[in-house]
Amino acid sequence: MPAVSTDTIAVYEIGGISIPEFIKINHGNWVPFRDLEFSILQKLENARNIILDCGGGIIFDIDVNGKEVVSDRKISLLKKIGKIVRLDANSDFLVSKVKNDLNRPNLSDTEPYSEILKRRTIQYNMVADFAISTEGKDPDTIAKKIIEIYPALLEKN
């Protein structure tokens, strides 16, 4: 199956600039980016037999107060596209990964990454059809686990 990354499509659609630069150009306003994610999911809503790689904020939108809120519109499209598999890792590992990745926008201007992750994890668990621990596993092992659960993904309503 082809792998499709919403972040890669986003970079393409915003003219090749990085996502952090796009957020900066929009004066730290995340609404245009979250709307772009929605637009990308709309374009993919009839896609079948793809692996869709999404950024950690894909299930969120921004409310009128600038706070992250669960995005029913995006979750609905994700569920239409396919089953949602959450890759789970140790929170310290995830924080260090995000914190040091210059290709990711800085989310910690107003709140520590650990708090963002704690809040988001509750929503990730509610949305995911399956969760796979990535702890101590290389990408090949994780891919094999996904292939192993694939029949259950097809059966799950």
Image: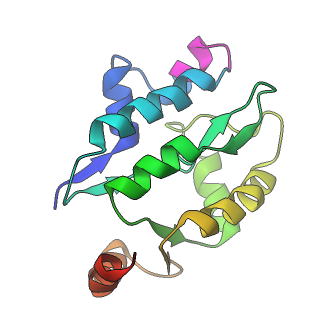
Query: Residue 118 in the image: x percent, y percent?
Result: 76, 61
**Residue 83 appears in which quarter of the rendering?**
bottom left
Question: Does residue 107 show up magenta in the picture?
Answer: no
Query: Residue 88 in the image: x percent, y percent?
Result: 55, 72
Q: Is residue 48 left or right of residue 132?
A: left
In the displayed structure, 81 sits above or below 27; it is below
In the displayed structure, 75 sits above or below 143; it is above
Screen quadrant of the N terminus: bottom left
Residue in the image at 71% along x and 42% along y: 69
- Identify the magenta region: 22-28
Query: Residue 94 in the image: x percent, y percent?
Result: 62, 61
Residue in the image at 40% along x and 75% along y: 157
**Residue 45 appears in which quarter of the rendering?**
top left
Looking at the image, the residue that sits furthest to the front is: 157
**Residue 127 appears in which quarter of the rendering?**
bottom right
Residue in the image at 77% along x and 28% along y: 66
